[in-house]
């Protein structure tokens, strides 16, 4: 049997929770018959069987890079990305690809980052905005591929029993789901993942009968659909059932006081029966398949795998306009509670949506990316 070319992936190990880890897990599964993968993990949590960059074992680190045919870097922190590029290209002279999984224009010292990325054989961005920013700074070998790879539901673990029971008890009511890898705020104090917006949305949806304040400013005509937005009073007239939310937060370790603030909000507004704030990891893919709406109220991001997964499953996906969203996404004005309320109201009235027709050959996309650097000249 012909030996498969070896590719070294550097980034958060697939056992971590998050968009990049999910991408890497699916990438290795997709290409398992074509390449042999080695891994350098850079996550804070260490896993058996994965060499971790934070062990500071320079000998093992450089040996792994030296003995591979191709290095593909998926580092999040800019400093780690720079260190990995310099080690791969200048010290070990390996063909090097870097994927930038965020909106790179939000990074500090972008000029330095661009200078380092010029050393790479290829830079992959997840959106055109980042690609354009790098090209303006002289990075020539740039292409754009969203990070999404199709999930395999059969490979996903079942939901925890308590979560599934919570859903089953409300199976005749609309369910909105959202997720966040952590709790983090911008310098202005706004929650990057928009957990606060999700909580206020459920409060507003479930208190329409008693709240007049949220009805004062009707949404202007939808510029994309050309249709007049529905007045939230439509829900009241039809006596809509309670709307529920499961917001998955993998960890609140960075901001435990913010997590407590959100839990207090739920209690203060008597929403314990309508909102489940779940802290920990679970299969969001499994959760998504049972949802009425997938919500992505983020402030800033590169390209959300969650949005593309929702579209892949044919689920209505309501997302902020804080990033360029794929076709089929239903957007609202970022950080605008009134607009979010009106958009979700409209979707709840007509939740059916055309199933996302994705004909992308993902296997070919990545073999076409890798194979030019795996020729005999690149050994």
Image (cartoon, grey):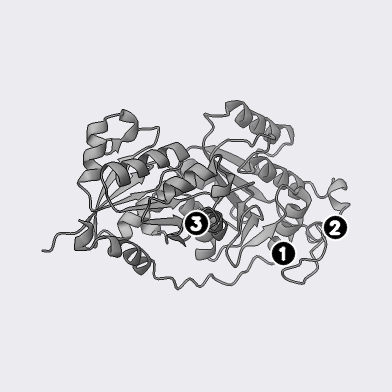
Residue 362 place in picture, x, y as percent: 39, 66
SS category of the residue bearing label 3? loop
Disc 1: which residue: 349
Judge the density around disc 1: few (<14), some (14-19), many (≥20) Cα neighbours within 10 Å: some
Quarter of image, res 261: top right
Judge the density around disc 3: few (<14), some (14-19), many (≥20) Cα neighbours within 10 Å: many
Q: Earlier in the sequence, mark 3 or mark 2?
A: 3
Do labels 1 and 3 touch, CB within 8 Å?
Answer: no
Disc 2: which residue: 218
SS category of the residue bearing label 1? helix
Q: Earlier in the sequence, mark 1 or mark 3?
A: 3
User: Which dot marks residue 126?
Assistant: 3
Q: Is residue 47 visible?
A: no
Residue drawn at the location 28% of the way across and 64% of the way down: 371
Where is 350 relative to 240, above or below? below
**Quarter of the figure that contains the N terminus:** bottom left
Where is 294 relative to 85, above or below? below
Residue drawn at the location 60% of the way across and 31% of the way down: 259
SS category of the residue bearing label 2? loop
Q: Earlier in the sequence, mark 1 or mark 2?
A: 2
Q: Is residue 37 visible?
A: yes
Residue drawn at the location 73% of the way across and 59% of the way down: 343
Tell us which disc is closer to us: 1 or 2: 2
The residue closer to the viewer here, 171 or 251, is: 251
**Quarter of the figure that contains the C terminus:** bottom left
Do labels 1 and 2 touch, CB within 8 Å?
Answer: no
Residue 77 place in picture, x, y as percent: 46, 39
Q: CA distance from mark 1 to mark 2?
A: 16 Å
Residue drawn at the location 31% of the way across and 47% of the way down: 89
């Amino acid at each position: 049997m012909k030996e498969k070319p070896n590719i070294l992936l550097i980034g958060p190990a697939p056992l971590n929770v998050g968009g990049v880890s999910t991408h890497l897990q699916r990438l290795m599964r997709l290409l398992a018959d074509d390449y042999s993968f080695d891994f350098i993990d850079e996550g804070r949590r260490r896993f058996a069987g994965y060499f971790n960059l934070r062990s500071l074992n320079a000998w093992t680190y450089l040996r792994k890079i030296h003995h591979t045919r191709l290095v593909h870097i998926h580092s999040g922190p800019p400093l780690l990305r720079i260190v990995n590029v310099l080690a791969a290209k200048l010290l070990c002279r390996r063909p090097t690809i870097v994927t930038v999984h965020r909106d790179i224009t939000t990074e500090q010292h972008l000029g330095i980052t661009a200078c380092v990325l010029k050393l790479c054989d290829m830079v992959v961005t997840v959106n055109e905005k980042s690609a354009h920013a790098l090209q303006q700074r002289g990075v020539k070998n740039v292409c754009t591929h969203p990070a999404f790879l199709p999930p395999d539901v059969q490979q996903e673990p079942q939901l925890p029993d308590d979560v599934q029971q919570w859903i089953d008890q409300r199976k005749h009511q609309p369910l909105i789901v959202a997720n966040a890898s952590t709790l983090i705020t911008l310098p202005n104090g706004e929650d990057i993942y928009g957990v606060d917006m999700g909580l206020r949305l459920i409060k507003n949806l479930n208190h329409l009968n008693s709240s007049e304040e949220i009805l004062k400013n009707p949404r202007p005509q939808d510029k994309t659909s050309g249709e007049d937005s529905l007045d939230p009073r439509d829900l009241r007239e039809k006596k809509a059932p309670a709307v529920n939310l499961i917001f998955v937060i993998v960890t609140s370790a960075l901001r435990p006081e913010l997590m407590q603030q959100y839990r207090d909000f739920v209690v203060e507004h008597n929403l314990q029966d309508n909102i489940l704030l779940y802290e920990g990891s679970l299969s969001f893919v499994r959760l998504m398949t049972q949802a009425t709406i997938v919500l992505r109220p983020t402030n800033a991001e590169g390209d959300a795998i969650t949005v593309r997964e929702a579209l892949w499953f044919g689920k209505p996906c309501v997302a902020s306009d804080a990033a360029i969203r794929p076709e089929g996404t239903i957007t609202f004005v970022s950080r605008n509670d009134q607009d979010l309320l009106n958009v979700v109201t409209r979707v709840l009235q007509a939740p059916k949506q055309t199933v996302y027709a994705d004909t992308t050959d993902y296997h070919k996309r990545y073999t076409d990316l890798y194979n030019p650097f795996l020729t005999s000249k690149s050994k």
